[in-house]
Image: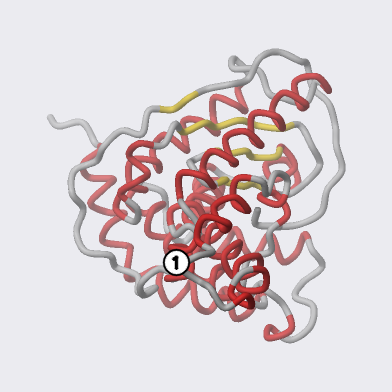
Amino acid sequence: MCQLCYARTSAWMPRRGFLALAGAAAATPALAQVDVGPPSRMKGLVPAEQIEAASTQQYSQMMAEARQKGVLGPDNHPIVQRVRAIAARLIPYSTKWNDRAKNWRWEVNVLGSDQVNAFCMPGGKIAVYTGLLSKLQASDDEVAMVVGHEIAHAVREHARARIAKEQGTGTLLSIGAQLFGLGQLGDIAAGIGTQLLTLRFSREDEIEADLVGLEIGARGAFQPEAAVSLWEKMGKASGGPQGPSFLSTHPSGPERLARLRENVPRVRGLYQQAVASAQPRR
């Protein structure tokens, strides 16, 4: 999970809050406008099916616990409907980055919490915390950039690669039998449980998620400049950047903002095309 800020739990009226969004297939888009290179080859050491199954199980358990505590947003709540409407405009463009995404059973839920955070687990399991909306006073465009960032982590399979790097290399490759150990890596992936919610992504993963999320958001007709205003708000909420960027898994505030500003013009045409396509014809 991408840790965006701090956490404390708050409650709202309990009701069921599950929704499986259909991963609508979009027309084949133009070539990517942002440059993030090929995905990590390490992910190939962990079977996608197993990590996605583990994700589904962990997400379901988490939502069930949230429902019990009364912090799972009900389907008819305006905040839930708002977040799901935003996600529905982004999800069709996930397949451009990962063909597997067209078969994912997407789910989008909102959790009542002061936490300024959101995540998208492998297989398209999304959650947004109300603190992200209330503390940042985030616009729809800014929420879209957060959700797009989290979707990017999922479609670029950062969790799958991190598990291979952290568990696989240390546990299996030291045995000196990489090929023989592939099945064991699969077993590790299937048994990771809550590790999917506590994985720390690398600085490179965060850069990829920023840029891929920026493009997904633009294709969904959300203003790309919102990525910059979002992280400006995030910096203020966290008290500003702390320490040099190389000491953190997240890029520093100024570095992150500079990179986003540099890439906004690259996706502005996609945004303009998306807005034009969404306008009713006379």
In terms of secondary structure, where does tag 1 sit?
helix
The quarter of the image holding the C terminus is: top left
Residue at coordinates 48% horizontally, 42% vertically from top-left? 123
Q: Is residue 97 above or below residue 128?
A: below
Colour scheme in use: secondary structure
Residue at image x 54%, y 69%?
Answer: 205
Please tell me in which quadrant of the rendered image residue 270 appears: bottom left
Q: Position of residue 152 (x, y in %)?
A: 47, 56
Give the camera-side residue of 67 and 138.
67
- Judged left or right of residue 87, residue 89 is left
Binning the other alpha carbons within 10 Å of mark 1 as few (below 14), some (14 to 19) or many (20 upward) gives many
Whether 240 is drawn above or below 54: the answer is below
Query: Which x, y percent locates residue 135?
Result: 75, 46
Q: What is the x, y in percent for residue 255?
A: 59, 81
Q: Tell me if 168 is positioned left or right of 111 in this view.
A: left
Identify whether 22 is placed above or below 195: above
Residue drawn where x is 47% and y is 37% of the image: 86
Q: How many marks?
A: 1
Question: Where residue 271 sits in the image (x, y, percent)?
Answer: 31, 54
The residue that label 1 is drawn on is 211
Answer left or right for 62 relative to 219: right
35 or 200, which lies in front? 200
Q: Amino acid at mark 1?
A: Leu
Q: Give the residue at x 71% y 52%.
A: 195
- Which image quadrant for residue 112? top right
Residue furthest left in the image: 282
